[in-house]
Image (tube, rainbow, N blue to C red):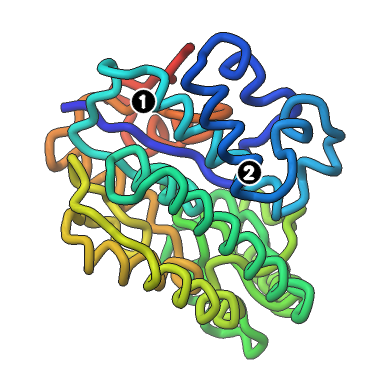
Amino acid sequence: MKAYVFPGQGAQYRGMGLSLFEKSGIARDMFETANSVLGFSITEIMFAGSDDDLKQTRVTQPAVFLHSVILAAVTGEQFQPDMTAGHSLGEFSALVSSGALSFEDGLKLVAARAAAMQKACDSNPSGMAAIIGLDDKTVEDVCQSISKQVVPANYNSPGQIVISGSNEGIDEAIVLLKEKGAKRALKLNVGGAFHSPLMEPAREELEKAINANQFNRPVCPVYQNVNGKPSVDPDIIRANLIAQLTSPVRWTQSILNMINDGALSFTEVGPGNVLQGLVRKINGEVLTGSVIF
């Protein structure tokens, strides 16, 4: 069985999507629609903007989403997933590419998500840190022992977890986790405490937008971040998507469940190859690759 996975924020790069725009009429139409929906020329920033412009959350999230869903669209009949999953933002790409959301609705939700997250970050300075070389329970126990809010946010692969929370909580956790034997514990250059309770104002704002949109039954199961389990029911998909902003990304669990359900290959759809590396760390026997156009 074929699994397709979609990357999240952090996979962006200057010039992303330009070859798609130049080679495919389908891609050009979708990019031009995106410029209209967003109300600014995201293509100018993606194709020739500065790195600083591309790092803005309001740009980064739609840019990664567009690269992924347009890449899936231009592959046509070759894109035939038996199951899909997306890492954080990538879950929106997975839902659009599997037919659970229309392209325009998905883009509008991604834009709303980016704006809500940016607002939450601006009002409550916070951050994230990558922890390498410790088991899940040790990281969970240390986070729970800290009075200033900090939680596991991304279960990326065995021995690789990202924590999220207040700046004070992150600093304290880094010290304690190094004492516990972490090989690396370093702050990430991100705007705030994504996938933590500190994103509650953004979750409330995004919930309204999600509930206002039509969700369809996808062509294949979508393994969602909040529990790593497959979903095809539109109501369950919607509820899990609402919960995603304040819940950890259970990527390790998602990949293991996909493998247990028969996935033999994982194809990354979008910029970069980070997810392929994570999949190989989770299980070195499955095949990995990228959609190339």
Name the kind of residue labelled 2 in the image.
Answer: Ser
Numbered disc 1: secondary structure = strand
* Depth check, front residue: 263 or 68: 68
Where in the figure is residue 213, as x and y percent of width and height? 37, 64
Determine which residue is flagged by label 1: 267
Determine which residue is flagged by label 2: 36
Crowding at dot 1, Cα within 10 Å, few <14 / some 14-19 / many 20+, comes out as many
The residue shown at (64%, 74%) is 165
Asked whether residue 221 is in view, the answer is: yes
State whether residue 68 is above or below residue 185: above
State whether residue 243 is above or below residue 290: below
**For residue 30, side relative to residue 76 (left or right):** right
The residue shown at (31%, 34%) is 283
Numbered disc 2: secondary structure = helix
The residue shown at (52%, 31%) is 30
Q: CA distance from mark 2 to mark 1?
A: 30 Å
The answer to which image quadrant residue 169 occupies is: bottom right
Crowding at dot 2, Cα within 10 Å, few <14 / some 14-19 / many 20+, comes out as few
Residue closest to the far bottom: 147
Quadrant containing the N terminus is: top left
**For residue 3, side relative to residue 41 (left or right):** left
* Depth check, front residue: 188 or 124: 124
The answer to which image quadrant residue 12 occupies is: top right
Residue closest to the far left: 261
First in sequence: mark 2 vs mark 1: 2
Where in the figure is residue 233, as x and y percent of width and height? 17, 60
The answer to which image quadrant residue 186 occupies is: bottom right
Q: Are marks 2 and 1 in contact (CB under 8 Å)?
A: no
